Image: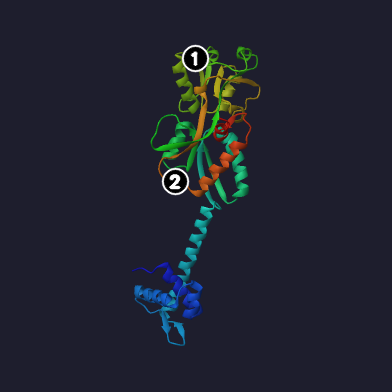
Amino acid sequence: MAPTFRQIQAFLAVATHLKFVKAAEELHISQPALTVQINQLESALSIKLFNRTKRQVSLTAAGQDMLPLFERIAGDMDQVMAASSDIHYARRGVVRIACLPSVAARIVPIAMEKFRHTHPNIRVHVRDVMGEDIVQMVKLNAVDFGIGARLTPDREIKVEGFLTDHICAFYQEGHPLGKVGEVLKLSDCVRYPLILTNQNSSVRVLFERSMAREGVDVEIAGEANYMSTALGMVRAGLGVAILPMSAIDAGNAFGLEYRPIDAPWLNRRIGFVRKATGSLSPVAEHFIKALQETGDSLPNDTFRSSRRSDSCV
């Protein structure tokens, strides 16, 4: 049988005090129980560790040789316990997340800034990627969790509600859409050449599903990976961009006008994407809490917290 850590602790206590009574008191066990642990350790190692008489206890030559080895084991175990405590209480570690660019530009930096004050030894690594890429990174364990929209059913992941945002039309100043009203309909927008995000984006998937509902064809004037590129196309006069309202922050909408589109099925429901089985590390759970608190505290200009929305129902 291999030595147990309790036996090693018993050996170190006796080696320190050279008295079984004091060693037993330190370990909060009885002297007979301590004697049993030492005997078991000596039996497991097939060597005698202590010379024992009624008046004196001393280390044997073998015991002296084993002392630094056992001290090293005890030191390593102390480090293990300290590290596990730090991880449990989120005092140190790494959080890896993949999230939509709009969330990465708006919500995540604010949460990170607050989080580093309360958890200074935790590093947060952020990957801003498209919707389907987020799901794949979660499934491949490339990140701890994602922040994205559920586009298609998938039994390997689960999504916990976090935010919702509205889809808007962005256009040049003086465009006819500016005279329609404060809120647009899809039928108002499809009359003009459209600029859309690429096909693996959550906005594009929602838009195409909406077009299928409406049963209309659209003229696509341009596609872009990033909202800043799409807004640049609008600024150049190529068409009207269909983007989430968060593009105001993420894409530099200076000089452009926008209106929300009245189509409930176009609103993005953004959530925390994680694997359906298994659990997150305490560090990741703490950062999710920081993100939720950040979402709750922001004004309803671009995103609305799902928890705050639920409380208003």
Of the 4 image quadrants, the one containing the N terminus is bottom left
Query: Where does the C terminus fall, quadrant-wise?
Result: top right
Foreground residue, 130 or 154?
154
Question: Could you tell me residue 254's position as x and y percent?
Answer: 65, 24
Q: Is residue 203 left or right of residue 173?
A: left
Q: Is residue 106 positioned above or below 56 on the image? A: above
User: Residue at position x 60%, y 39% from top?
Assistant: 294
> Marks 1 and 2: in contact by CB < 8 Å?
no
User: Dot 2: what SS?
Assistant: loop
Image: 127 above or below 23: above
**Percent x, y of residue 248:** 61, 27
Based on the displayed image, in which of its 4 quarters is residue 109 positioned? top right
Q: Which of 235/307 is in front? A: 307
The residue type indicated by label 1 comes to Glu
CA separation, marks 2 and 1? 45 Å
Foreground pick, 223 / 278:
278
Residue where numbered disc 2 is placed: 279
Q: Residues within 10 Å of mark 2 (few under 14, many from 20)?
A: few
Mark 1 neighbour class, 10 Å CA radius: few under 14, some 14 to 19, many 20 or more: few
- Residue 233 bears which disc, if any? none
Residue pointed to by mark 1: 219
Q: Secondary structure at mark 1?
A: loop
Q: Residue at x 42, y 84 (%)?
A: 52
Q: Residue at x 49, y 56 (%)?
A: 84
Q: Is residue 268 above or below residue 144?
A: above
When the figure is inspected, residue 2 is found, relative to residue 256, above or below; the finding is: below
- Residue 311 in percent (x, y) is at 57, 33
Please name the amino acid that badge 2 sits on. Ser
Instruction: Name which of mark 2 and mark 1 comes first in the sequence.
Output: 1
Residue 190 x/y as whole percent:
52, 14
The mark closer to the camera, 2 or 1, is: 2
Residue drawn at (57%, 38%) of the image: 108
